[in-house]
Image (spheres, rainbow, N blue to C red):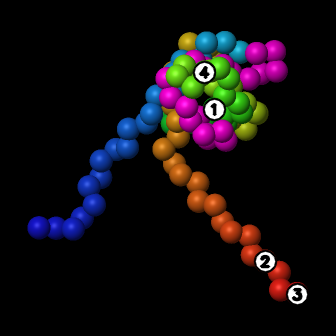
Amino acid sequence: MSNKKSNKKQKMKQLGTISHKTSTNKLIVPSKITPKIGSIIVNKQKKPIGKINDIIGSTKKPYISIKTSPKFRKAKVGEEVYLSTNKKRRRMRQRQAY
């Protein structure tokens, strides 16, 4: 028996398809799951397209508002989007000694 980790690909969680774009360049996606605000959203090629800005509507069928910026890839209406599987590690800020 070997203790090697299996190299299975992590399956991305599908968030939904982009329904429309607002006048403030935010993307609206109807979803079946409620993700955390600030999560990074990626396309099929795992390229980041934005961050979750707001969650609107009921908890059973929420609408996700995705904030885009020039550093992210452009997304089109009708494109499927996914939650990023990369977990960001938060670093603790070191306190200064007095």
Residue 36: x and y, percent?
A: 60, 40
Residue type (three-letter) at the residue carrying disc 3: Tyr
Q: Secondary structure at mark 4?
A: loop
Residue 98: x and y, percent?
A: 88, 87
Q: Gap in Å between the C-alphas at discs 3 and 2?
A: 9 Å
Figure quadrant of residue 6: bottom left
Residue type (three-letter) at the residue carrying disc 1: Ile
Which residue is label 4 attached to?
Answer: 58
Q: Gap in Å between the C-alphas at discs 2 and 4?
A: 40 Å
The answer to which of marks 4 and 1 sits earlier in the sequence is 1
Binning the other alpha carbons within 10 Å of mark 2 as few (below 14), some (14 to 19) or many (20 upward) gives: few
Q: Gap in Å between the C-alphas at discs 3 and 4?
A: 48 Å
Q: Is residue 24 magenta?
A: yes
Q: Which residues are magenta?
A: 22-43
Q: Is residue 63 above or below residue 43?
A: above
Which is closer to the viewer, label 2 or label 4? 4
Q: Is residue 92 above or below residue 76?
A: below
Residue visible at 29% across and 52% down in the picture:
7
Residue type (three-letter) at the residue carrying disc 2: Arg
Q: Secondary structure at mark 2?
A: loop
The answer to which of marks 3 and 4 sits earlier in the sequence is 4
Which is closer to the viewer, label 2 or label 1? 2
Residue 53: x and y, percent?
A: 71, 33
Q: Is residue 62 above or below residue 50?
A: above
Horizontal side of residue 24 vs 26, given as left or right: right
Which residue is label 2 attached to?
Answer: 95
Binning the other alpha carbons within 10 Å of mark 3 as few (below 14), some (14 to 19) or many (20 upward) gives: few
Which residue is label 1 attached to?
Answer: 49
